[in-house]
Amino acid sequence: MAATLTGLRYRLLPHPGQERILGRSVGACRWLWNWALDYRENIWLAVRGSGAKGVMGSVGYVHLSSLLPGLKQEYPWLAEAPHHALQATLRDFDRAFAAFFAGRAGFPQFHHKGDRDSMRFPDPKQVKVVEDWVKLPKLGWVHFRRSRPLGGEVRNVTVSREGDAWYISFCVRGEFVLPNAGRAPIGIDLGISQSVTTSLGEVISFPVPAEKEERRLRLLQRRASRRQKGSRRRRLACRAVAKVRRHWARRRRDAAHKASTRFATTHVLVALEDLPIQRMTASARGSKENPGRNVEAKAKVNRGMLANAHADFRRMLAYKCARSGARLVIVDPAYTSQTCQACRHVSPENRKSQAVFLCTACGFATNADWNAAVNVLAAGQAVTAQGGLGVTPAVELRTHPRDRKPSRSGSTGIPAKAAPAA
């Protein structure tokens, strides 16, 4: 297997003096990002009416980094942060605008304290790792919890803060191989009440916030909103809200990691439906002129879909399949929930509820999510029929747009089996 880049994250344990330096350094990087965004917006407003062409293209990393020495003279506290970390911030800023102009991301936003507090050390020559100690510029040796080996060459290091805790992420280049048991292919259907349903009849429910937990979060949010801005009590209240959200995110991420690892290391082929999460979770509120309908119900569905972390699960499954040699096939989800796996009849009337599938043509009845997972597997096998199902290090294969709607007659090629209970 060829060498690849991966990120390994550990808990950083700085002493109080190092923690103060880290806090000031990430604050300097955040301030520099906001200054660069404000500087570029002012130039845009100045040249927008003049008709000058090519001005905005020249306001890139080279121009902004040339202004950095003058900023350090004007703001001496800016020199307390590592110089390479400040340069890395400007490089990230330049890449953010490049992604915006290419249509891959939205317009860069101002960074706020406590949100994305991080800094990157791009030069591996300035970083040294010895067992569970890492040497960083202007910080010296810092202890971290080395819960697993690095297993490769360190290319760059990122230090970030989440609440009261500090973390260090190593970008490592090496060969990361996962074992594969070589079992039969599997299809996966994604849902809300049932997070993951497989073609083998297995149902996995990712941990989502319970009603009691959501009430607790609303209580903490109201408490924070009543506190005076800038006060110590408001800062403590906001810290409590962030702690609850971090707990939910870590719990959700842990479940997605365990499920994706098991699928990638067990089966030779994994067929997954291609859900457009961003478009499906778009707001239905509308505008004053054209207000949306069923906004509250749509918002509840959006929260349930985002709480299941389908995008994270797909991302994890993609790189883990690449490491284990499994083949990941991304299947267009169109008509998979309306197609009968027994007679291939397609009709919206086949699925009158979210739980039960009842074919109006042959009377086949089963669990709706399991029926969709079987159809996803059939579509994935159709893509790889010519090349076979050998273990190849392909990351993703996609179904052709012409194959979105299945035929109304024929067989899935999957033997009949006892369906799980609805």
Image: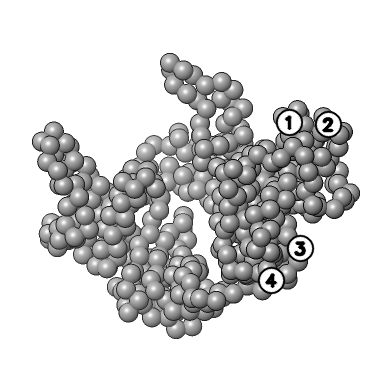
- As shown in the figure, which amino acid type bears the numbered disc 2? Ala
Neighbours of disc 1 within 10 Å: few (<14), some (14-19), many (20+): some
- Which mark is nearer the camera, 4 or 2? 2
Q: Residue at x 49, y 83 (%)?
A: 131
Question: Nearer the N terminus, badge 1 or badge 3?
Answer: 3
Q: Residue at x 64, y 66 (%)?
A: 326
Q: Is residue 333 above or below residue 170?
A: above
Cα gap from disc 4 to disc 2, whole angstroms: 40 Å
Question: Nearer the N terminus, badge 4 or badge 2?
Answer: 4
Cα gap from disc 1 to disc 3, whole angstroms: 29 Å
Q: Quadrant of the C terminus?
A: top right
Q: Which residue is mark 4?
A: 180
Neighbours of disc 4 within 10 Å: few (<14), some (14-19), many (20+): some
Cα gap from disc 3 to disc 2, whole angstroms: 30 Å
Neighbours of disc 3 within 10 Å: few (<14), some (14-19), many (20+): few
- Which mark, by number, is residue 347? 1
Circles 2, 1 touching at the beta carbon (< 8 Å): yes
Q: Residue furthest bottom?
A: 130
- Which mark is nearer the camera, 4 or 1? 1
| Element class at badge 1 | loop
Residue 287 lies left or right of residue 181; in this view the side is left
| Element class at badge 4 | loop
